[in-house]
Amino acid sequence: MYKNKKVIENLFKKKIKLIKEYNKHYFEMDNPKVDDATYDKLKDELLELEKKYIFLKSIDSVSKIIGSPPSTKFKKIKHHKPMLSLSNSFNKDDMEDFLSKISNFLNYRNGNGIELYSEPKIDGISASLVYENGLLTRGLSRGDGVTGEDILENLITIKQIPRNLSKFNLPQTLEIRGEVYINKSDFLKLKDKFANPRNAAAGSLRQKKSKETAKIPLKFLAHGFGAISEKIFNSQSDFNLKLKRWGFVTNENNQLLKGILEIERQHKLIEEQRSKLEYDIDGLVFKVNDISLQNRLGSTANSPRWATAYKFSSEKATTKINEIIIQVGRTGAITPVAKVEPVNVGGVVVSNATLHNEEEILRKDIRIDDTITIQRAGDVIPQVLSVDKSKRSKTSSKFIFPDRCLCGSKTVKEISKSTKKVDAVRRCQKGYDCDFIAKERLKHIVSKDAFNIEGLGKKVIENFWALKLINKPSDIFRLNYKKIEKLEGWGDQSIGNLKNAIKKAKQISLNRFIYSIGIRHIGQENAKTLADFFKNISEFKLLFNEETREILLDNLIDLDGIGETQIVSIDSFFSKKQNVRIVESLIKELSIADYIKKTKAGTLSGKSILITGGLEKLSRAEAKNLAEENGAKVLGGISRKLNYLVIGNSKPTKSKIEKAKSLGIKIVTETEWYKILKI
Ligand code: IVH
């Protein structure tokens, strides 16, 4: 193919230059220029060339250039306490929802009396600083939230990070969390290298050489705490004052406030000032100010209940609808999507906008060819805000919502068992028989919170599906690698990584497994509750059989978070023979670990409780949390193992009390219960 030495040499040099450039973007700037497949392909070509033409070795060494993967760049260290993320809110309704959720949890009449601390949300990179006896000993990146990377060397190049706080007589361990960022004006000097200030901060922070980091004017703004050995502040605002005293920079625009009206006012005020601020912000964080309330509220799997990020309604743009298509979700939900004339909205080219559901289209009378205003908030799919009817042609006609799924079968609007209302969403009822649902279920199975298989993303699933490499979940564990090897973009390295990731995923905990199989209304929290109830996969399998299922479902109603909606959903999932078959064949590929609930050490360690009826002082959710925080286990039903049955004033279940009495279990009132808890 190659005519002479010179040609080969030039080709080799060209490719070497390219791979060096890719490396620079990947390793140094943290901003990959190409996808993994393209990179792997180039790498393979280079190795191939080198193997074929030995003389090339004297020009450059390919193996040296390829380097090591970034995961080994920094030491990995587990956080003392996980670094969670924040739930997002986008409008007044969401914020009202946030307030009512926390007031329900705390058993308050409404959320308007709860003091909140509002802080601008800087768009940077979060970091954790651990001070031991006042000295900075640890500096970690967030990583995956559980394990971070040791970037202390780089962090100490930031002037705003104090290294010695020993003169302040601090608790022995004090973990400060905050945001590393770069000012807009400083970013201008770097803008050829990075797409935005956030990337610039991330890239600089992850430089291999701290000397390189030191050249970049990174800043640090403190906004939270992690592990702390002694309580020395009672509120977020108090903590903020202490931070300032210790020499940290905190945000000048932080504000204490209450209620939805003040939330809206503050949000509007800061949004107006946004463009004048020295740094990029993408919203406000609202935190419950009182730390003891924060502790009572605790967190869900991913984010604290006591805080939310109220995002700015970012940019809007006008465009035209070319087409309205439907998408099918893993629960069969049909979502209409507007394919629009591509338009730039705040730096991102948008060509799709969600239309939510049939009702929304009817209400706004949205039609094909309409001129519309769209809005993009955060990283969610843009929404259609309004239609400019004056620009509509006379021949335009109402959009008729398809009553069939993409698979061809009829869709239905279900009637909710609990509210008796007709659902706004149409659904395909075919389950795995619908190719579109089946594909979405596969995407869910491999996702981060489920089997977490890296290298098997949505696009790969689509691709493998089209090539008939995957058709059901168990196929993931029986991939035909001989076929994959021949596909474009797959090299030895990417296949090796995929094999490893899949092998690792075979070991899965029961709660993750339950979440993964994708029963509607069973999210991560409910999956944990169910795993705690069933304990191991063989007990869980009793759901597959109609008779045992009926008995089990009757018992589930006692579990917190599991109501009629969830029970109906579990029943309908397992009454489909095909679902059972598919789940069974998946189980065969796996090793599913029994659920071991992490109980905390406390006054009630080793004890179990059950609450029946509503309590006066606490919501059920908080009562459960509180018992668990004190080391107790909250059981789903009365059994011999039960230590205490707590009876609330409002509608306790008689049969439970009777049963507890007959088993000689200690029965306590709400007040007695608090005495036991010593609160
Ligand atoms: S509090 C449990 N406060 O936003 C998480 N976060 O989307 C508590 N962020 O990872 C975070 N400004 O990096 C908090 N004033 C602020 C913040 C802030 C920016 C970042 C932070 C976090 C991310 C969550």
Image (spheres, rainbow, N blue to C red):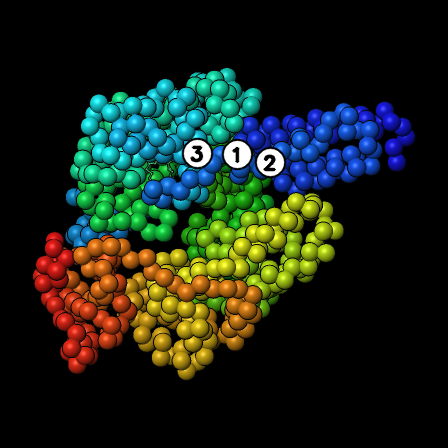
Q: Nearer the viewer, residue 129 or 542?
A: 129
Report the disc number at residue 73: 1
View extreme (right): residue: 3
* Left or right: 157 in relation to 243: right
Q: Helix or strand or loop: what does disc 1 sit on?
A: loop
Q: Helix or strand or loop: what does disc 3 sit on?
A: loop
**What residue type is disc 3 on?**
Asp
Q: Nearer the viewer, residue 276 or 26?
A: 26
Image position, residue 426 (x, y; %): 47, 62
Report the disc number at residue 12: none
**What residue type is disc 2 on?**
Ser
* Pointer 3 with pointer 2, Cβ within 8 A: no
* Residue position for label 2: 68
Image position, residue 172 (x, y; %): 24, 34
* Residue position for label 3: 150
State how far apart marks 1 and 3 are (Cα): 10 Å
